Image (tube, rainbow, N blue to C red):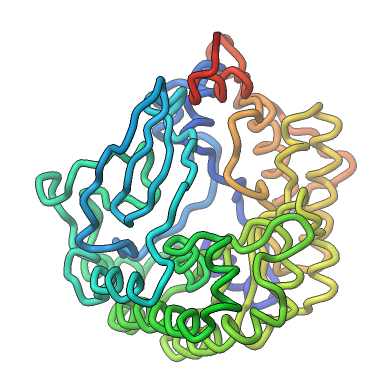
Amino acid sequence: MTQRERFLAIIRGEEFDRIPYMYGGPRASTFAAWRKQGLSAEQQRAWGSFTGADGGMGIGKFFPGPWPGREEAIVEERGNRRIWRDAWGALREDAIDQPTEGFATRRYLEYPVKTRADWESIREHFDPHSPERTQPLAAHQVRSSLNPDAYRHHPPGGTHWRDLVERCNVSDLPVKATFYGPYWAIRDLCGMEGLSIMFYDQPSLVHEMFEYWTWFMMEMLDEPLHAIKVDEFVIGEDMAYKKQSMMSPPLMREFLLPQYRKLYAFMKERGVEAMTMDSDGYSNQILDVLYPEALDGINPIEIAAGNDPEEILTSYPGIFIHGGVDKRELAKSRERLRAEVRTRYESAWRHGGYIPTCDHGVPPDIPLRNFLYFVELAHGLCNGEDVDRYEPPCKLETQLRPIEEMFDHRSAIARAYGDEE
């Protein structure tokens, strides 16, 4: 089977020859920590081939933020902390000097949308037909930003979807796309607390904002999805935490389900094989409302939040999931790591519809040698090796340089916030 055929077979619940080699993506801060643990620049650059991971294709640039963005402004700087307004209009606090690339330090102090007038003002910056949303831009066409990472920032570059149509449609690799969903997007404008209050105090405005965002998504994606066959479209929501979702089931049924029905029909009419949600935190309340009527699956199945891949696969027949390998166990002993990985691959082979990977972005507190052991162990279990007896060859770690320094999260936090003595 090709990688694409295998991926589609797992989505459809059909027979497959092996599980895809997918492990989870290290964060920028993780790679920075791993460079001090012996990873070379070339190994990082060619990470996919170094670890033997299967590949995938995207469908080009789709910028979901305000265009043009609002003028950024510094309000105050104290030590290593900066208070400023970003291009979305939010007042936030960030570390000025980051201890490692991609180390998230943002803290939001105020959000731009509190009233209907606020919404009507910022809505003008969300025209789905602005050509800059899909066209590659040169550096001089994009404002410089105070943003310490790529989130909520419009970077230069990118590839237009029209330039990828033929490559995607003939590719042997899975074709995937992603976009912010209505909860994520409107929460970014109102804040979680603000939006939670608005569900009760301004419900008609919330309905209007959710409806607008759904229209915004469909307008931007209509032509590309007619031209490109997408295997998995991931709606980013991040709408849950431990044992609970951020919207109660009744609120989801009132505000979210109608929009997901529209999105699901839109995706299926354009040949999308699976529409899934990316949401950290507990998944079951979301699935109880949206699956299978308006969703085909969910990821990353965070174990710390109370998720259990085995229980999800049993309780929601036909679902497609990926993730579910507890990142905390990957940072511990190899015995603990083995026990965790064994459990997840047993579920994947027993049920189908499941690709085990790290249950979120791979964090920097997972030692490099632990992760490479996981990669080689998972590789064997993907191929159907005996989960009780298989021992990986550990060849990858022999290619590393000596360890200079191990990651210390306490020191990194102290440096980020200027609290280190």
Percent x, y of residue 12: 64, 78
Residue at left 69%, top 31%? 373
Percent x, y of residue 354: 70, 63
> Which of 421/403 is in front?
421
Residue at left 45%, top 57%? 56
Q: Can residue 221 be seen?
A: yes
Percent x, y of residue 196: 59, 68
Rendered-image quadrant of the C terminus: top right
Does residue 349 appear to the left or right of 252 in the view shown?
right
Does residue 85 appear to the left or right of 93 in the view shown?
left
- Is 260 drawn above or below residue 50 in the view shown? below
Does residue 264 appear to the left or right of 77 in the view shown?
right
- Is 354 drawn above or below residue 24 in the view shown? below
Q: In which quarter of the view is residue 293 placed?
A: bottom right
> Which of 247/401 is in front?
247
> Which of 322/93 is in front?
93
Q: Can residue 49 be seen?
A: no
Rendered-image quadrant of the N terminus: bottom right
- Residue furthest to the left: 140
